[in-house]
Image (cartoon, rainbow, N blue to C red):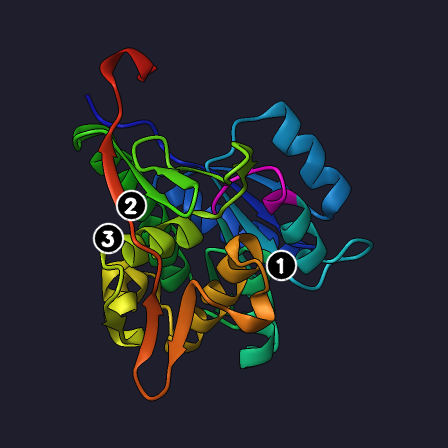
């Protein structure tokens, strides 16, 4: 049986652009809903299942960056940002807010479709791999990563919100603790190249992870920067099986 079509929500204030995107995606097998601003987006997300959000940066009222940050605070919903300017600073801001990918206007709709498929494929692949792999947790300095449920808990046991990209990168670090990893290798390990990422995105993700796990993000001791090398995860990491009776 074929999988159900992905449910895409397009948030774009320009009606012509919004309709063109929706028409193209529908013609390529997607189930598409649209919204012109943040308030309409909130209603759509509440009323309909959404698998991926396409979010324009320049919106009336609450802008796309603010909406992205608000959504990411409570949800792992994949987000692709659209920016009219296409400058690195805009792309970096989108990544810092928690976006999974970005695309500069004007763009070829085929490229947008490719980005959508890549982000959804990446998410599905990591979920399938986690479900099929031996259920393990990774422990370091009291922190625990559940690689099957894709959850991170701090030493007090509280759940720490992470984007899919952040979790992938931290897991790559933990699985290779004590090794210097270049930005290129980190892109490959986290499938970043498939999402059209660039080396600067690794720096952004590292900065976000540091803010969540480091005692002092300004004096990082867990994820150290190696001059002309990349990064190294310094804590000792313990790998543990999850007991069968603890699995959902």
Question: What residue is shown with label 3?
Answer: 175
Question: What residue is shown with label 1?
Answer: 56
Q: Which of 182 and 76 is in front in this view?
A: 182
What is the spatial separation of the Cα atoms under label 3 and label 1, in whole angstroms? 36 Å
Point out the frontmost of discs 3 and 1. 3
For residue 196, what is the image quadrant? bottom left
Give the mark nearer the N terminus: 2 vs 3: 2
Q: Nearer the viewer, residue 145 or 197?
A: 145
Q: Name the main secondary structure of what is drawn in magenta.
A: loop
What is the spatial separation of the Cα atoms under label 2 and label 3, in whole angstroms? 22 Å
Position of 93 with respect to 51 (left or right) is right
Q: What element carries label 2?
A: helix
What is the spatial separation of the Cα atoms under label 2 and label 1, in whole angstroms? 22 Å
- At a point 73% along the width and 48% down the height, the residue shown is 37
- At a point 25% along the width and 19% down the height, the residue shown is 243
Please provide percent x and percent y for residue 25: 42, 47
Q: What element carries label 1?
A: strand
Position of 197 with respect to 82 (left or right) is left
Q: Are marks 2 and 1 in contact (CB under 8 Å)?
A: no
Question: What residue is shown with label 2?
Answer: 121
Please provide percent x and percent y for residue 95: 53, 63
- At a point 59% along the width and 78% down the height, the residue shown is 89
Q: Is mark 3 on a helix, strand or loop?
A: helix
Range of the magenta residues?
71-78
- At a point 22% along the width and 26% down the height, the residue shown is 2
Position of 151 with respect to 208 (left or right) is left
Res. 83 visible in picture? no
């Amino acid at each position: 049986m074929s999988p159900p079509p992905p449910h895409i929500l397009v948030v774009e204030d320009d009606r012509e652009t919004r309709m063109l995107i929706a028409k193209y995606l529908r013609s390529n097998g997607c189930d598409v809903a649209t919204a012109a601003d943040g308030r309409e987006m909130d209603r759509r997300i509440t009323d309909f299942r959404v698998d991926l959000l396409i979010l324009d940066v320049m919106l009336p009222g609450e802008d796309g960056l603010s909406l992205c940050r608000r959504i990411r605070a409570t949800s792992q919903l994949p987000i692709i940002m659209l920016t009219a300017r296409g400058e690195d600073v805009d792309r970096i801001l989108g990544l810092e807010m928690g976006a999974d990918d970005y695309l500069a206007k004007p763009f070829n709709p085929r490229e947008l479709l490719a980005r959508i498929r890549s982000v959804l494929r990446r998410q599905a692949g990591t979920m399938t791999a986690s479900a099929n792999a031996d259920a393990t947790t990774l422990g370091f300095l009291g922190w625990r990563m559940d690689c099957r449920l894709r959850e991170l808990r701090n030493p007090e046991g509280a759940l720490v919100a992470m984007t899919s990209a952040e979790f992938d990168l931290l897991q790559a670090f933990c699985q290779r603790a004590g090794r210097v990893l270049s930005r290129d290798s980190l892109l490959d390990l986290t499938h970043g190249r498939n999402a059209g990422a660039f080396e600067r995105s690794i720096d952004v993700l590292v900065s976000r992870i540091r803010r969540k796990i480091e005692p002092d993000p300004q004096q990082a001791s867990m994820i150290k920067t190696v001059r002309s090398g990349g990064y190294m995860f310094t804590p000792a990491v313990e790998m543990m099986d999850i007991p069968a009776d603890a699995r959902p």
